[in-house]
Amino acid sequence: MNRPSKVIVIAEDDRTHSFVWNFLKKLKYGRHHYTPRRVPGGSGEQFVRKAFANEVRAVRSRSASTVLIVVVDADNQTAEYRFRQLTDSLRDRGIPARSETEPIAILIPKRNIETWIRFLTGEPADEAQDYKPRSGSAGDHRMQNSVRIAADKFYELTRPNAPLPPGITPTLEWAVSEARRIPSAAGG
């Protein structure tokens, strides 16, 4: 793949966008590369699913090399169910499925990104628990401060031959392999 000129990120909330942006900075992407697709209102999961098919079509039609990162929470579902919803959204629109070599990464935290942030910052994390703090709470402020640290650790895990830590959550382990689809902006 040529050096990407653009990275499109579809995610359900600002904290997730912040996590992905901090990860992309480690891959040497700048603001001029980054194109966030934010939920205008309503269901974040539904927005991501609908935007996914549109963005896959758009990415494939661009002459410039483009990366697509999609982050959708599993919530009370399984990651496999959410993944199937995304692939079904392509099929339903007559769009071919993602190939093994396409720079399209699908990240599905169970329950939400806060589970990964907890694990990546060294706190116990259980995918059955909901760690999303209430907006404006002290936990919300701590979580926001942990995003950069978690994204840096995620970057380290995505490096070739990086060992996975004991107790890594299943969806985070899957995300590590998905994130390896994303080339560095510096090339190589």
Image (cartoon, rainbow, N blue to C red):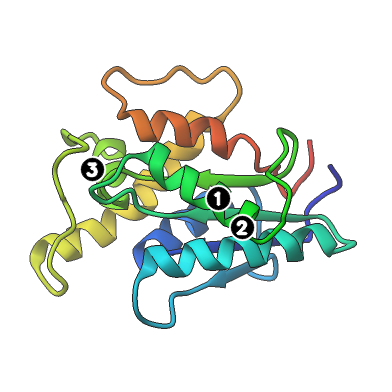
Mark 2 and mark 1: Cα distance apart in space? 6 Å
| Placement of 33 over or under 160, stated as above or below | below
Q: Is residue 69 left or right of residue 144?
A: right
Residue at 45% in and 17% down: 163
Q: Is residue 154 left or right of residue 106?
A: left
Few, some or many C-alpha atoms within 10 Å of disc 1 (few <14, some 14-19, many ≥20)?
some
Q: Say if mark 2 contacts mark 1, CB within 8 Å.
A: yes
Which is nearer the eye, 76 or 137?
76
Give the percent coordinates (x, y) of residue 60: 80, 57
Q: Quadrant of the C terminus?
A: top right
Q: Is residue 69 left or right of residue 74?
A: right
Q: Which mark is residue 88?
A: 1
Mark sitting earlier along the chain (3/1): 1
Give the percent coordinates (x, y) of residue 176: 49, 33
What residue would you read off at disc 2? 92
Q: Quadrant of residue 29?
A: bottom right
Give the percent coordinates (x, y) of residue 79: 38, 40
Question: What amino acid type should be assigned to the residue bearing mark 1?
Answer: Asp
Question: What amino acid type should be assigned to the residue bearing mark 3?
Answer: Arg
In terms of secondary structure, where does tag 3 sit? helix
Question: What amino acid type should be assigned to the residue bearing mark 2?
Answer: Asp
